[in-house]
Image (cartoon, rainbow, N blue to C red):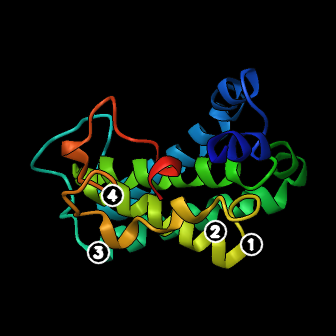
Amino acid sequence: DQIWLGSYMSGGVGFTQYATAAYTDNILDEYTYYGMDYLKDKYGYDYTHPDPAAVIAPTQDIVNDLATEVNLNAMEQYEQYPTMMEDHFGGSQRAGVMAAACGLTCSIGTGNSNAGLNGWYLSMLMHKEGWSRLGFFGYDLQDQCGSANSLSMEPDRGLMGELRGPNYPNYAMNV
């Protein structure tokens, strides 16, 4: 029931959920490319020429800097173009798009999947603080509870990225 209601309240079931990725894709690309430009301008990292020697050390300060910059840019874009905000309705779609861009920027720039996870979670927390909610009712808990558990070895409490597989559990089923 929780999965159905969460899906329904965030934009419906079936085709609507499958289509979300397609119709938010260009905006996710925009936010991610903003992050890539920021990486190049501030840290000299060029994602078009990946080099293991050029990645940035995955520290909390780096994650904070990258995720904050990308997330604030995304929030400003949503506020500047209200029709885009309305199109990504319910909050959950906006939260997912912004968090994905933050996670991608952090993981690509550092070469570290855990930095990407923490960039994702920081984006969720910033979104909650900035706009008061991520989704409908209490269905945003799973998007906020991961920060403290991102190095957990238990699959129902976060699990490190390297240990996740194609059958990684759905957060809504485990929280």
- The circle on residue 94 is none
Closer to the N terminus: mark 2 or mark 4? Answer: 2
Report the Cα–Cα distance between label 1 and label 2. Answer: 6 Å
Which secondary structure, mark 1?
A: helix
Disc 4 designates what residue? 158
Closer to the N terminus: mark 3 or mark 4? Answer: 3
Which secondary structure, mark 2?
A: helix
| Residue density around tag 1, few if under 14, some if 14–19, many if 20 or more, within 10 Å | few
Disc 3 designates what residue? 60
Closer to the N terminus: mark 3 or mark 1? Answer: 3
Question: Is residue 37 visible from the viewing direction of this image?
Answer: no
Disc 2 designates what residue? 127
| Residue density around tag 3, few if under 14, some if 14–19, many if 20 or more, within 10 Å | few
Q: Nearer the viewer, mark 2 or mark 3?
A: 2
Q: Horizontally, is 108 left or right of 17 in the view? A: left
Q: Hey, what amino acid is under mark 1?
A: Trp
Number of marks present in the image shown: 4
Q: Report which quarter residue 3 is drawn in.
A: top right
Residue 174: percent from left, percent from top: 44, 53
Q: Hey, what amino acid is under mark 4?
A: Gly
- Check if mark 1's residue and mark 2's residue have beta carbons within 8 Å: yes
Name the quarter where the N terminus is drawn. top right
Report the Cα–Cα distance between label 2 and label 3. Answer: 19 Å
Disc 1 designates what residue? 131
Residue 155: percent from left, percent from top: 28, 51
Q: Hey, what amino acid is under mark 3?
A: Gln
Q: Looking at this rendering, what residue extends furthest in the top direction?
A: 15
Residue 27: percent from left, percent from top: 67, 40
